[in-house]
Image (cartoon, rainbow, N blue to C red):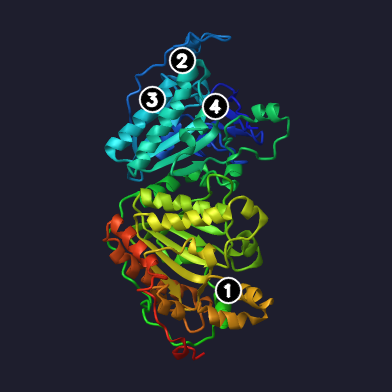
Amino acid sequence: MRQEQEPVRAGQDVQWRRCGACGAFVYGKRLDRNLKVCPECQFHFRISPDTRIRQLADPDSFRPLPADYEPRDLLAFSDSKPYPDRLRDARARTGRNDALVAGELTIEGHGLVVAAVDFSFMGGSMGAVVGEGIAAAARHALARRLPLLLIAASGGARMQEGAVSLMQMAKTAQWVAALREAGLPVVNLNTDPTFGGVSASFAMLGDVILAEPGSLIGFAGPQVIRNTIREELPPGFQSAEFLLEHGMIDAVVPRENQREHLARLLSLFGPSVPELPEPGGAEPLTEPLPALRGARETVALARNTGRPTAADYIGYVFDAFMPLRGDRVCADDQALLGGIARLGGQSVVVLGHQKGHDTAELVRSNFGMPNPEGYRKALRLMRLAERFGLPVVALVDTPGAFPGIGAEERGQSLAIAECILELSRIRVPVVSVVTGEGGSGGALALGVADTVLMLQNAYYSVISPEGCSTILFGTAEHAGRTADALRLTASDLLRLGVVDAIVPEPPDSAHSAPHPTALNVKTALVRALTPLLELPGDRLVELRRERYDRFGHPEHQPVVDWEDHDDH
């Protein structure tokens, strides 16, 4: 458990602080230079909202909002001390009316509104003044069309204000909702501690949720949990790192990196430049290629572990990328990457199945087979894309969704179905690129798009050749035959109208030259996105619906003489 130590004075004018984690004594001025982070063990000391705002804001940019509303003792509450006396003591100690500081500032030139809770004022508890202050900050952000940064450090709702305090949870949540509906970003920065009615309202509702290292964040405090369930808590329970692992937050950001991290995030959420970059790779092909390889050889190339992964393409294709993590329910599935990126001047949401180049990476990413948590993360980011009017770019490369017992228990089918449904209805451009394996519904969960591109040596199929062979022949030995029969190559699918264009690969396939391949992908994305950006949302949805209505419709069935194309 974290322990904050009071200053220890050596002599008249030298202040030292004892670290609550490692026990080291740190000279006060050195600690200040290190942003109140222990230089020995990186323990983050609690800091006041004023200090934090100075660390984050551009010099002289902070303009406070009015803070003249004072708390009232509506209940005539008294425990060991009357509530008015507690308020008087807190005011004397902190010099403020209540536990909130709010105002407008800039971070590297990006304007935003901030509301920060002060833990030193009655444990940062949220009463009517804090709730109203956060609502006022949200109203100001709405009026000024600015993002809102909410910084929490709180033990929860303020008991001394009873049900009035409880109502602040609804009040703050509804103002976060208003900003969502207006398409304005809300970012949470949760610090130590963030609990109770604060964590169960505005502190966990942001579009992006960040936390400081080691911060304790949860609903019920550890002691309450121990006393209720009579069990020992696991190591690291309710820490920021624990929440990241369990999909509840997007990132744990050390204090020294918070200003830069927020600036990058604000930049990606900021206005996009309408023009996309000039393409620099080979143009996508809209006519089938001559068959240079058999279907089974194509499948083998699509599975090659040297082939670029989603992370590789993100690094090569986009100018900036901010990963967002977690499904906000259970876990962060590393088989599915997601985040906000820049393609030239255009911000986009990127989703991608992630594999790896070696055994460790493949195991960590579950060989590119997402669990429901991965698809629910994707679903969360699809909705974020629509909220902020950002196009979606999806990179498809999976053998299929993970077919495990736990995945079934946690609703794998529903998670995939919800992604397919969401992509069919979102009012922003969607471009999907099959970069390697396009395995069944697990691939289609990222594959419903306005434009579908496919790399030359990728494949896309209702089932793997081995699975098809096993079902039809009772053995996987006929996988080559079923690969041919499934018509799963890029040229085959272009003929069927399943894909719109083929992205060329080097003669020896993508794994031989990842960077040129990625430039070809970038070119194809620019070509696909440019006309889509000009269409209104309703028209995008209409055209997307027409696209998928064609498959199986008697009047739109493609007629292909496969014998003319079976020259491999």
Of helix, strand and loop, which one carries label 2? helix
Residue 114 found in image quarter: top left
Amino acid residing under circle 1 = Arg
On the image, the x and y values in percent for residue 285 come to 37, 79
User: Quadrant location of residue 424?
Assistant: bottom left
Q: Tag 1 or tag 4, which sits nearer the N-term?
A: 4
- Does the residue at mark 1 contact the one at mark 2 (Cβ under 8 Å)? no
Q: Residue 363 in the image: state x and y as whole percent.
A: 65, 62
Query: Mark 1 highlights which residue?
Result: 303
Q: Residue at x 50, y 17 (%)?
A: 162
- Residue 325 lies, in percent from the top left, at 52, 50
Tag 1 and tag 3, C-beta contact below 8 Å: no
Q: Quadrant of the N terminus?
A: top right
Residue appearing at x 53%, y 58% in the figure = 336
Q: CA distance from mark 1 to mark 2?
A: 67 Å
Residue ID for mark 4 = 155
Marks 3 and 4 in Cβ contact (< 8 Å): no
Per the model, the C-alpha gap separating discs 3 and 4 is: 18 Å
- The amino acid at mark 2 is Ala
**Mark 1 → mark 3, Cα distance in angstroms:** 56 Å
Task: Say whether residue 180 is visible.
Answer: yes
Residue occupied by mark 2: 92
Q: Earlier in the sequence, mark 3 or mark 2?
A: 2
Image depth: mark 1 or mark 2 in front: 1
Q: Earlier in the sequence, mark 1 or mark 2?
A: 2
The residue identified by callout 3 is 132
Q: Label for residue 322?
A: none
Circle nearer the viewer, 3 or 2: 3
Which comes sooner in the sequence, label 2 or label 4? 2
| SS at badge 1 | loop
